[in-house]
Amino acid sequence: MTRVLVAGAGKSSTYLIEYLLLCAQRHKWEIVVADGSEQAIMEKLGHHPNGRAAAIDITNDKERRPLVQEADMVVSLMPPHLHYLLAKDCLDFGKNLITASYVSPEMKSLDAAAKEKNLLFMCEMGLDPGIDHMTASQIIHSIQKVRGSLCCFKSYCGGLVAPADDDNPWHYKFSWNPRNVLTAGMAGAEFLQRKKPVQLDYKNLFDPKKKVKINGLGNLGYYPNRDSLHYLDLYQTHDTNTFMRATLRYPDFICGWRALIDLGLTELDDNLPAFKNATEWLAYKSNFENGNAAGLRQHVAQKLGEQADGKIMNLLAWLGIFDAEPLSGQATNSSSALEEILLRKWELGPDEKDMVVMAHEMEYEQGGQRHHMTSTMILEGEGGNRSAMAKTVGLPMAILTELMLNQKISNLPTGVCVPTMPAVYKPVLKRLEHHGIVFKDSVV
């Protein structure tokens, strides 16, 4: 019996496991789901006859390695640093691996060994990274086929809240790992602008002036994402003048987050004393001694160079930091204290829906004429575990798993890869369209 090991039963696994269980019924497979929480596994598997639960500690070799050894394919939704453990097992036992995470240096170091064993370790096979690579590569390759020359490439993606459930001034609720949201951008970003590499530190990523128009949604804010220059080679776009990958947020979020950075409320290494509430924490961070909440608000406004009753201060006030929003006293740094607050304030309710937005903007020259192309996808979730984020992260991995196990892909690459090759993106994108993940293109 063909056996698929899925490592991880968190929020992003719903559609992945559901899709694979449907495949298992048709093809007589077994889907083994491994996670530290048996409850999380059973919520995804139910009592499906083709599913098997494996409640294990993924870091325990004796529990993990036998599951990899008996599998025909390994799909990992574990935290990024744990993919390496599974990848080493896959090398030992000769198994292919699919993940949704960025290629880490540790994973990249296995490239030669994977090629030697004729194995594929497909990384960045989710939403962003993942669907962005596939759709961008498809467009770039189509431009190159008609002898077009790419001048400008900008790619944007964001997990947001659906308009009907957008009821807070930050216009944001968590639809994926909150810790990742809080640490996003901390390493800064690098991209190409008018032929020149640009490097931005954490604070300067969040520029309220940076906006992009998304058809159907209006102007959204954005901040550059990680090292875009790394993808010039992968996308084969060395001649382009501008190349940037970015994360989408609403403009008010960008303004508010920059204020949080300016106040030091996102710091990871400030070794906080124990605080009972956010007002004590904010007073400590802003060097405010004595006085009431109104005095603290005025003090913070002056520190930021803002009006005490202006938009930025109202965004901060909504978080409750001027009104003694409770803290557990367990946070050891400001980022953890902020996470406590945001988990309450930005919780996506059980009946509320998220929204995924992805957009590519490209300019290219062909036959002496310059063209501007946009390609946009907007997808709303169904509520609960059936989020747009889970769908767009999980389905690409599930579809590639099915295609590989059924030998539906010719010229399958080997080594540590990301999905920029036609042999992978063409069949996967075609299947995604059947599930409502569709891009609308415009060329002028």
Image (spheres, helix red, strand yellow):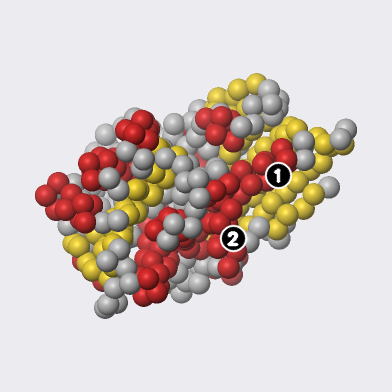
Q: At label 1, which amino acid type do we have? A: Ser
- At x 30%, y 63%, the residue is 2
Q: Position of residue 224 (x, y in %)?
A: 57, 37
Q: Is residue 352 above or below residue 280?
A: below
Residue at image x 37%, y 35%? 115
Residue occupying the point 77% across, 36% down = 148
Task: Please state, as top left, top right, bottom left or bottom right, where the N terminus lies in the image.
Answer: bottom left
Which residue is disc 2 drawn over?
430
Picture coordinates of residue 314 (x, y %)? 54, 51
In primary-sequence order, the first of circles 1 and 2 is: 1
Q: Amino acid at mark 2?
A: Lys
Q: Does the rendering let one see residue 128?
A: no
Inter-mark Cα distance, 1 to 2: 16 Å
Task: Give the quadrant of residue 417.
Answer: top left
**Mark 1–mark 2 contact, CB under 8 Å?**
no
362 to the left or right of 8: right
Viewer-closest of 422 and 32: 422
Q: Name the one closer to the observer, 189 or 430.
A: 430
Q: Residues within 10 Å of mark 1 (few under 14, many from 20)?
A: few
* Residue farthest to the right, as pictured: 368
Location of mark 1 (residue) = 142
Q: Can residue 83 be seen by looking at this rendering?
A: yes
Q: Residue at x 55, y 62 (%)?
A: 432
What SS does tag 2 mark? Answer: helix
Q: Is residue 366 left or right of residue 271?
A: right
Q: Is residue 179 left or right of residue 298?
A: left
Q: Which mark is residue 96?
A: none
The percent position of residue 434, horizontal first and vertical second, equals 58, 68
Quadrant in the picture for residue 286: top left
Out of 205 and 92, give the one closest to the viewer: 92
Horizontal side, residue 86 vs residue 157: left or right: left
